[in-house]
Image (tube, rainbow, N blue to C red):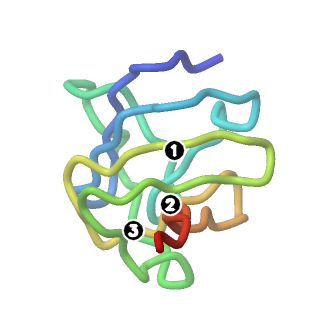
Amino acid sequence: MIKNGSRLQSQVCDTQVIVVRSADGLDDLRAGGAPMVPIGSEPTAGLTLDPALSDGNLMGKRYVDDAGAEVLVTKAGKGTLSIGATPLSIKEAKPLPASD
């Protein structure tokens, strides 16, 4: 299982993330359809960006899944972050309470 604080990179684009909150599903974390690997690892030869998962991601945004996993993008890229084939969604900011 991937641990909190792990730094990962995509094998098919420039995306890099830090794991903020781990969950079992993160073992299949992907960017652009290819599995993410620890930063500094050599990419697997022959992998290409999946056109169906090439909407990109935004630097500084947190992406979450339904199981509670959360990653922070530290370097944006062309690949969509997903767990398996299910894209992650951007974590929305909590609304502030109204002040009178």
Q: Residue at x 53, y 51 (%)?
A: 30
The foreground one among 13 and 48 is: 13
Q: Which mark is residue 89?
A: none
Vertical relation: 59 (above or below) 1: below
The reply, left or right, for residue 93 in relation to residue 18 is: right
Looking at marks 2 and 1 on the same chain, the residue that comes earlier in the sequence is marked by 1
Give amino acid for label 1.
Pro
Other-residue count near label 1 (Cα within 10 Å), few / some / many at <14 / 14–19 / ≥20: many
The reply, left or right, for residue 73 in relation to residue 86 is: left
- Per the image, label 1 sits on a secondary structure element best described as strand
- Per the image, label 2 sits on a secondary structure element best described as strand
Q: Quadrant of the N terminus?
A: top right
Residue 8, by quadrant, is top left
The reply, left or right, for residue 19 in relation to residue 87 is: left
Vertical relation: 100 (above or below) 31: below
- Per the image, label 3 sits on a secondary structure element best described as loop
Other-residue count near label 2 (Cα within 10 Å), few / some / many at <14 / 14–19 / ≥20: many
Residue on which the image places disc 1: 35
Residue on which the image places disc 2: 81
Task: Residue 32: give x, y in percent of width and height.
Answer: 45, 65
Q: Which mark is residue 79?
A: 3
Asked if disc 3 and disc 2 are in contact, CB closer than 8 Å, the reply is: yes
The foreground one among 42 and 15 is: 15
Marks 1/3: CA distance?
A: 11 Å
Give amino acid for label 2.
Leu
Query: Can residue 90 be seen in this snapshot?
Result: no
Marks 3/2: CA distance?
A: 6 Å
